[in-house]
Image (spheres, grey):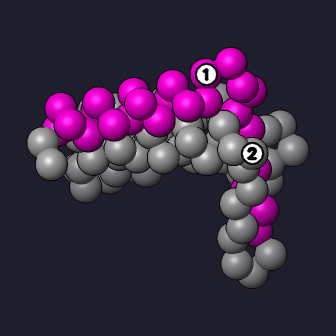
Amino acid sequence: MTDEQLRSLARQIEALAAGQQPTASLRAFGEVALYANRAGYLQLAAAMLRCAGAEHADIGALFAVDSEFAIDHLALSEAEFDQLSS
């Protein structure tokens, strides 16, 4: 699959969630669990497809205020990951 095909698929998935309020929450209890409503899971899937297609995706606003932590960045390279985490 090409990068453009991945981004096109991401747009199609985002359209499935149009008009809905996406939300997600992470909880740690020795392991980590993720809950999201339908629109939240669709937004996460679309964001990961965008990253697989070499495009940055913003999911910082997805996580609910009661989430114990959130994913602020999806890094596209190890160098970007190292820069974000230093």
User: In the orientation shown, which residue stands out farthest toward the bottom?
Assistant: 30
Viewer-closest of 17 and 61: 17
User: Does residue 6 appear to the left or right of 40 in the view shown?
Assistant: left
Q: Amino acid at mark 2?
A: Asn
Q: Which residue is mark 1?
A: 18
Q: Secondary structure at mark 2?
A: loop
- When asked about the image quadrant of residue 47, the answer is top left
The residue stretch that appears in magenta: 3-28
Q: Determine crowd level at label 2: few under 14, some 14-19, many 20+ residues with C-alpha closer than 10 A.
A: some
Q: Determine crowd level at label 1: few under 14, some 14-19, many 20+ residues with C-alpha closer than 10 A.
A: few
Residue 21: x %, y % from top left:
74, 27
Residue 81: x %, y % from top left:
34, 50
* Disc number lying in front (1 or 2): 1
What residue sits 35% from the left and 44% below the top? 49
Q: Earlier in the sequence, mark 1 or mark 2?
A: 1
What residue sits 87% from the left and 44% below the top? 66
What residue sits 74% from the left and 56% below the top? 35
Viewer-closest of 78 and 38: 38
Residue 78 appears anywhere in the view: yes
User: Does residue 4 appear to the left or right of 68 in the view shown?
Assistant: left
